[in-house]
Image (cartoon, rainbow, N blue to C red):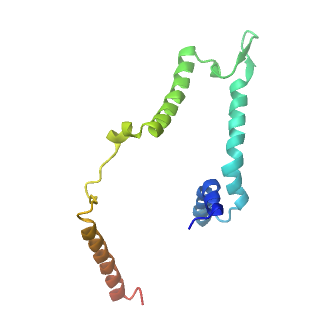
Amino acid sequence: TLTWSDMLFDLTMSNVMKLREDLVSSVGHIPVAWAFLIRHFIPQVLLILFFLGADATTIDEEGNEVKVFGSYGGYATTYQVLGILTVVFAGFLVVSSLVFPQLYEALETVDETETKVDENNIDEIEMAEKDQVDDIGNEQLSKGELA
């Protein structure tokens, strides 16, 4: 049974601790503090930096103070709008997939080899899987791998 502390851990740290475990095998020791910072501190710092950058001003060629956001690199307004609309469109795709997932069913690939499970064939599938596991076990026994 799940306890409140298990649910709290799953909600706050589970995914980043699994990432940490996966990375330890390839990069060596990673402290738990890294996982905590990645999950709870760094995203907020990045948001603050983004908001400060979006509100920043600079001086243009004529000496006028202009906002940096929307006047990146002195590009023409058309390119500025195109860049901003690209980000807005990406956000729209994410939000629409959360609100209306059925919109994206046409993009789902269907695995032809996957067996459809229903009440009629569940026993057949379970027996086939059991036979497959038995075959693998017998093969390993005959090779002496399980001895």
Asked if residue 56 is positioned above or below residue 39 in the image, the reply reads above
* Quadrant of the rendering where the C terminus is positioned: bottom left
Q: Position of residue 16 (x, y in %)?
A: 62, 56
Quadrant position of residue 124: bottom left
In the figure, is residue 123 to the left or right of 53? left
- The residue that appears at 75% across and 11% down in the rendered structure is 64
Q: Which of 100 and 143 is in front in this view?
A: 100
In the figure, is residue 88 to the left or right of 68? left
Q: Where is residue 137 in the image (x, y as percent from the top left)?
A: 35, 82
* Quadrant of the rendering where the N terminus is positioned: bottom right
Quadrant position of residue 132: bottom left
Q: Position of residue 131 (x, y in %)?
A: 28, 77
Quadrant position of residue 22: bottom right
- The residue that appears at 32% across and 39% down in the rendered structure is 106
Q: Position of residue 104 (x, y in %)?
A: 37, 39
Asked if residue 81 is positioned above or below residue 124 in the image, the reply reads above
- The residue that appears at 68% across and 62% down in the rendered structure is 30
